[in-house]
Image (cartoon, rainbow, N blue to C red):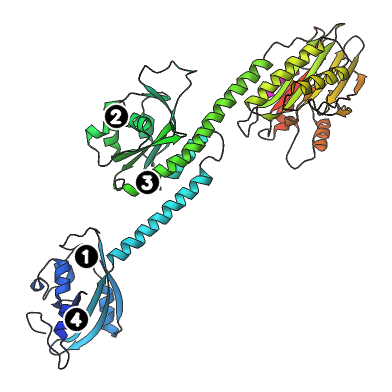
Amino acid sequence: MNGEGHFPEGDDLPAHQLVEGTLAPIVVLDSQLRHLYVNPAWVEVSGLPASAFLGRTLGEVLPDLRRPDDVLRDVLTDGQPREATISGTTGVASPLGQRLWRAVYHRVDLPEQGMCLCGIGVEISNLRRYLDDLETAHQRLALLDAAVTRVGTTLDLETTCQELVDLLAPSLTDLAAVGIVEEEFTDAPPPSPGFLRLRKTRGVAPTGMEWVLRQLGGPGPYIDVPRGVATRHCLDTGRPWLGNLASDELFQKVTVDRRRTEIFRAAGIHSFLIAPLITAGRPVGVVLLGRAGSSQPFDDDDLVTIQALADRAALSIDSARRYSYEHTMALELQRALLSEPSTPHPAVEVAARYLPSGRSVLVGGDWYDSIPLPDSRTLLVMGDVMGHGFQAAVAMSQYRSLLRTIAASDAGVDRILDELDRQVAHLGLDRLATCLLAVLDPGAGTCTAASAGHLPPAAVRPDGSIEVLWLPAGPPIGTGLGGYESLTVQWNRGTTLLLYTDGLVERRGTDIDVSVQALETLSLPVHGPLDDMLDTALARLANGAFEDDVAILTARRRD
């Protein structure tokens, strides 16, 4: 090895043709890891002449490369060849950014040099980039798959939006927030002409950046978005908006209030991506994402992945929004119907409760009523239309109106149920209902009841004991089968009659008859207001949240 760093000719092998002509970088190092020789391939990738290497270590020549010095010393020590990795940047720019070589080092003895190292490397930057891209693709496919099971687990709008931002951050972004297009303006004046209202729902930010979410859209639960800002552009065009390494001018396109650029700068946010939530060709909202600090700007792969996630989430969010709207309408309808003044005979005291399910947003067809009859008698009604939602609530109102009309005939409770069943079947209402009727007669001291597939009432005695009144159970209303039977029992002063729907007692995994029988073990206040009895019964039977809607009605003779 001469001072010029040229590889010498061998006796029979044109070594310089093989070594200096190969595309693989080859180096020879002395025992101090200083360069004795570099071949043209290494000169080309390093961007430096061979003379820059001779007599110097790799760290002295290319300090931006990570060097395997420990591995090289081990080879010098025991003579066992080893593989090592060299990575970093050289003076030659690469579209791959960081470059990567895999090298193998052998210990050799050279005349006049003694123990040396010979290293031969192969660049694997493309392979590493391919593997990294493949891993990123797998991770993003996993995110898309996760969206199916993690977003839209309930029909609650707020929960669905929270699930979306939790999926996006921190996997794909530092900060995420969702705004939903507001179409109903029941609790605030409508936006000015040309503005579109977004309701702020849920957001997520790194620890210490939560204040950004609070200030992002200004005070209040809504943002009225004019034309010309990025959010409105997304909603109008259905296409995402990307602002990488944004200038102040670009930031001002993200927010309605230009002063909020200062918020972004203070939080270290440098890039924004806004993706529309589109379903059936119409916008239901937007998701806004921001990257801050050392996070890389969004790239094309981010854009594709995030929009795909937004498209999937839009379906769940739209379903939750429509269901929430239907639930609100049904609940308002049901409350309006049930809030009509009860009109029992003055000799009868009545109290009632209606509670929607605590474990879902469903509203059912539960209803109750009290109708005065001649001779100081009162008809109590408890019914449950099968199904949930707005249609069940509408059907409930039809049943209630029909029953009031039929009850005016002052027929017996069994005859009323027969006629109700006949008329419902004739009208073709597609929802069956269970129904319990009870006529309280203070003068005679009797209670006459009949059931159309409904759970039996319970009598709460003055001494606190409770008895379930098992009635002959006829078919549900709407079958057209009829054939109902009544039962008359004594109704003494101080006795309270309790009517209810199955949501009060039905429990998963427990036979309904067992659950009803358990009513007899309750301890209820019997001498105070009926409202106290209702509150106590609901508290002791709830066990957390009711699994179905609950309607409960109590009645007793006035003193």
User: Which badge, 3 or 2, comes first in the chain's sequence?
Assistant: 2
Can you identify the residue that label 4 sits on? Answer: 31
- Residue closest to the eye, 185 or 481: 481
The answer to whether the residues at label 2 and label 1 have Cβ atoms under 8 Å apart is no
Query: Can you tell which quarter of the image residue 264 is in?
Result: top left
Mark nearest the camera among 1 and 4 is: 1
Q: Which class describes the residues within 10 Å of circle 4: few (<14), some (14-19), or many (20+)?
A: some
What's the distance in space between the residues labelled 3 and 2, CA to CA? 28 Å
Kindly report which numbered mark, 3 or 1, lies closer to the viewer in this rendering. 3
Kindly identify the amino acid type of the residue bearing the numbered disc 3: Val
Q: Answer whether residue 423 is magenta in the image.
A: no
Mark toward the start of the polypeptide (2 vs 1) = 1
Residue occupied by mark 2: 260
Q: Secondary structure at mark 2?
A: helix
210 vs 34: above or below: above
Q: Which dot marks residue 65? A: 1
Residues drawn in magenta: 345-360
